Amino acid sequence: MSDQEAQGTAETGSRPVRVFLVDDHALFRTGVRAELDHAADTVQVVGEAGSVDEAVAGIGHYRPDVVLLDVHMPDGGGAEVLRRVRPTLPEVVFLALSVSDAAEDVIAVIRAGARGYVTKTISGRELAEAVCRVAEGDAVFSPRLAGFVLDAFADRPGAAPIRDPELDLLTPRERDVLRLLARGYAYKEIASELFISVKTVETHVSSVLRKTQLSNRYELSRWASDRRLV
């Protein structure tokens, strides 16, 4: 490592990781803040929110390094926060912190762009370490949850499939059309690639828009990218 690189690393490590808390239970947020205060030399809580709208506004204002994100909230949950924040603030890292250890919840939030997923049984010290690790680029999971992610994304023979309820609404042909659409293909090019008519492509796109409740090609492309279809 050069002297300049070493200096840059030292400067990066000289300040605590700035954290924003998102959870709809104020008492839980208070507890997490208190736990992380014990690691104030490495982690600093800069703000918190109890709803999706508050989270989107707060993250945009504070520009934290890491967002600790609850998965289930009444107005949309962690995946909705990710969907609204990541396109404009791609540098912000998200770590899911949830009481749920269900495979569907883990995969949904990872597909949406979270860098890791830990459960609320984690200790304060372990949570501070997890925050620092994702800030440095690592992926962090509570022990049994990592297997869900490997099964979902590694396509290992014999791996138990992880279901995505939204993705499961689409037919195989609709997924093919969506994948090419997200890659930037025009309708005529999709028709040629899949040996179908342009009219059939339009019909499939309309069906996908209806099933996903999205309104345009840009939103479909982002939706497909979040689910690793591209």
Image: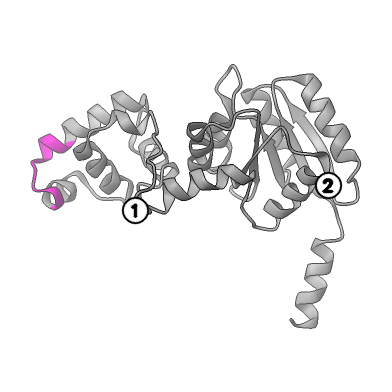
Q: Which one is in front, 18 or 43?
A: 43
Q: How many marks?
A: 2
Measuring from the top left, give residue 177's x and y in whole percent: 23, 42
Say which residue label 1 marks.
157
Residue 11 in view in this figure: yes
Q: Which residues are magenta?
A: 193-201
Principal secondary structure, stretch drawn in magenta: helix
| 134 is higher (above) or lower (below) than 211 | below
Residue at (88% x, 46% y) in the render:
39
Q: Amino acid at mark 2?
A: Val
**Comes first in the chain, label 2 or label 1:** 2
| Residue 94 placement (x, y as % from top left) | 64, 42
The structure residue drawn at horizontal position 50% and vertical position 35%, both measured from the top left corner, is 103
Is 200 within the magenta? yes
Secondary structure at badge 1 equals loop
Three-letter amino acid code at the position of disc 1: Pro
Q: Nearer the viewer, mark 2 or mark 1?
A: 1
